[in-house]
Amino acid sequence: MINVCFAGITGWTAPPIVGAIDRADDLVLTAGVSRSAAGSTLADAVGSSGGGSVHDSVAAALRAAPVDVLVDFTSAAAVRANVLTAVRAGVHVVVGSSGLTAADYAEIDRLAHEHSVGVIAAGNFSVMAAVLRRAATMAAEHLNHWEIIDYAGDTKPDVPSGTSRELAETLGTVRAPEPAVPLGDLHGPVEARGTEVAGSRIHSIRLPSFVVTTEIVFAGPGERLVMRHDPGTDPDPYVDGTLLAVRRVSETVGVRRGLDSLLFGAPDQR
């Protein structure tokens, strides 16, 4: 049986994942983390049959309950401290929150090796998003020009999203796209060209009705190839990928990036 602590237990992503954990024969929810619901039982806070309680911090949850895997769907402001706390306690981590940088992942990877724990981080635990990332990686081996468009809701503060950042960093391990007009040669504000992550340009759009949509446009003379993952407004697409990560995070010490590393056996991206 795998004991799970869910950080962000009262958040938007939690209900279908908590329900799936409760229905699983090999998983049990032993603790949750939420400042707004701290002190409540899991049953009262989210209707879970796990029998544990909700705590105001990851550290408090790990002291109070047996935990094998921490699942973090919190925020860019909280995720780094939560992951480091769990790793130092010898707890495996599944990271679904955005906001961690390449430098953060390098630090987490070093600590994970020191404490012999696994960490699986994905900007998006949708299986379809993982297929897009794998397909884009294959395309980048043959196509020379691309840019990424990152869509999210108007209240999402971190830019680019973890999904788009992760895609750019993955493509950066293949190669960088051929450059367009150099920023110094532009006529107008350079901000209009977005930001650069691992060689790829990302344009972040924040508007109502989006959740996290990721689009990559490949282009060549006379033709274009557009790949886009466009999720709906509920978190159900993230359930299967999250549970797969919970079940397999202990298999490998250190950080693995992207759900595709589990689905397709991709090498670690650090």
Image (tube, grey):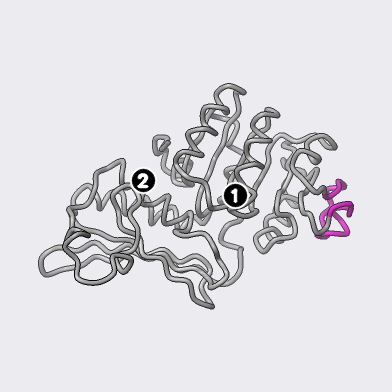
Residue 207 or residue 43, whichever sits in front:
207
Image quadrant in which the N terminus is located? top right
Few, some or many residues within 10 Å of mark 1 (<14, 14–19, 20+): many
Residue 18 relative to residue 255: left or right: right
Sequence-first tag of 2 and 1: 2
Amino acid of disc 1: Thr
The answer for how far apart the CA atoms under marks 2 and 1 are is: 20 Å
Residue segment shown in magenta: 38-54
Q: Magenta stretch containing residue 194, yes or no?
A: no
Few, some or many residues within 10 Å of mark 2 (<14, 14–19, 20+): many
Tell me, for residue 242, which label it has, or none. 1
Image quadrant in which the C terminus is located? top left
Residue 91 or residue 27, whichever sits in front:
91
Image quadrant assignment for residue 195: bottom left
- Asked if the residue under mark 1 is in contact with the one under mark 2, i.e. CB atoms within 8 Å, the reply is no
Instruction: Please name the residue shown 51% across and 57% down the image.
Output: 126
Q: Regarding mark 2 in the picture, which secondary structure is present there?
A: helix
Tell me, for residue 170, which label it has, or none. 2
Mark count? 2
Residue 137 relative to residue 236: left or right: left
Instruction: Please name the residue shown 41% across and 66% down the image.
Output: 204
Q: Position of residue 137 (x, y in %)?
A: 31, 49
Q: Position of residue 49 (x, y in %)?
A: 84, 52
Residue 203 relative to residue 56: left or right: left
Tell me, for residue 125, which label it has, or none. none
Residue 246 relative to residue 141: left or right: right
Amino acid of disc 2: Thr
Q: Regarding mark 1 in the picture, which secondary structure is present there?
A: helix
Above or below residue 110? Residue 226 is: below
